[in-house]
Amino acid sequence: MAAPAARTALRAAIMDAGLTAVLAFFLLLPLIGFRTVQNIRNEIVLETRWQMLFGFVAMAATGRLFYSLVIAPWRERRATQARPPAAAVARLRPILARWFAPFCIGFVLVYPALSIGLAGFQGSVKWIDNFGIQILIYVMLGDNFGIQILIYVMLGLGLNIVVGLAGLLDLGYVAFYAVGAYSYALLAKTFGFSFFMLLPLAGCLAAFWGILLGFPVLRLRGDYLAIVTLAFGEIIRLVLINWVDLTNGYAGISGIPRPAFFGIPFTADDDGFAATFGLEFSPLYRTIFLYYLILGLALLTAFVTIRLRRLPIGRAWEALREDEIACRSLGINTTNTKLTAFAIGAMFAGFAGSFFAARQGFISPESFTFLESATILAIVVLGGLGSQVGVAIAAIVMIGGTELLRELDALKAVFGPDFDPTQYRMLVFGFAMVAIMVWRPRGLISARAPSLFLREREAIAAGATEKGRSLREENP
């Protein structure tokens, strides 16, 4: 009986995969199969990309076949099997909670040394700058791996205050990022102030604009709030484009002063960093300095967010997120609560923007489009609303995964020599959003510990959950 059942299941899985291949073919045919290009006579001609199209169709059919033969039976078996005792899970969770954060912090601290040891002194620039710094900016909010990821970690943590803790959907968060970047660029070039002097000033200016945005939207919720914040982000971008006398329009601002190490510039001159410490000049020194600088900013953002969540204002944000009417009935000033969420979230975006301008040395309105806000919001949603660890993981996976796509030249052998993996990152974002919404609707890390305990945290025994008794009551 088992063999006929297995053959029936295999036949059904093959038919399902074939149907998936047909649907994928017709859906992707106009998107990938055809492309319009301009020839040397300035004529628009239609080109076909059959190799790339059939490659995507094969991937869709193979993925569906794998799901039908492996994942679906595994989920059915898992649903019928007994789950591990709650007590065992409760014992394992404190161990992970105790050692996970120290391990991650230790890893990011030694990441530049590991990159130098594995990729060499010159080859490690890409891995520290692109992968490390950019992710840290996105956790708070590039082009390089380490610095790039850290930028997005920082931005994600800042937006997590507004969206994750206060429950205010903000689609124009990139506007505060732009305010911080242009504030630093203009003040540094005009008055010659140092980076560490302008960093808090850029954050304060971004917080001021956050308050200006908060006042008109105090009575708005949900979709209406999202539309207004989206419009605010576009207004800021259009102002940057059209106020040419101040921002130089589309041409942007170049020659932005770079941060120095206690007044020592990272140049090849006799008073530069390398000459001062008797080292051979290399651009890697500036990259490592920027990496640890954005790492410190991201850790500061995470620390302040955790501390704020435990304060009355943090508990007011969470109460506002759950039910605004009940929040008002408790006597909480919802006006101040919303304004503080917008202001503090915008402040961290201003910090990230000032670092972005100092790192790049050039900024333009093209760096602050709606796509950046969508990316940061996707990081917050995928990581889990209100979860700092989830935001960090989502930034590493999304931004780091996008940067790794640049290294996958082997995919050209499958999809053709004209295939550029980075052009399909939004497709990857969409797939990740759909997968997370199906698999874990509340995000990668949806469980969050309470911010306040009446007495102390107590574990609950597996056999006492139905009775509602704690371990202390079970074992007096």
Image (tube, grey):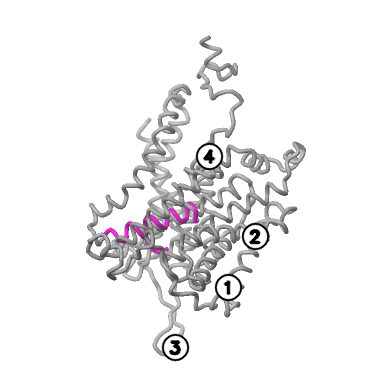
In the rendered structure, which segment of residues is drawn in magenta?
124-146
Name the image quarter holding residue 45. Answer: bottom left
Q: Which mark is residue 446?
A: 4
Q: Residue at x 27, y 69 (%)?
A: 270
Disc 1: CA contacts within 10 A as few (<14), some (14-19) or many (>=20): many
Mark 2: secondary structure: helix
* Residue 128 included in the magenta stretch of the image: yes
Residue of label 1: 240
Q: Which mark is residue 229?
A: 2
Mark 4 and mark 2 lie on one chain; the one further toward the N terminus is 2
Mark 1: secondary structure: helix
* Amino acid at circle 1: Leu
Mark 4: secondary structure: loop
Name the image quarter holding residue 171. Answer: bottom right
Q: Position of residue 39 (x, y in %)?
A: 40, 85
Mark 2 and mark 1 lie on one chain; the one further toward the N terminus is 2
User: Whole-Å distance between the Cαs marked 3 and 1?
Assistant: 33 Å
Query: Which of the two discs, 3 and 1, sits closer to the camera?
Result: 1
In the image, 390: left or right of 53? right
User: Whole-Å distance between the Cαs marked 2 and 3?
Assistant: 41 Å
Query: Which of the two discs, 2 and 3, sits closer to the camera?
Result: 2
In the image, 96: left or right of 199? left
Query: Which of the two discs, 2 and 1, sits closer to the camera?
Result: 1
Residue of label 3: 42
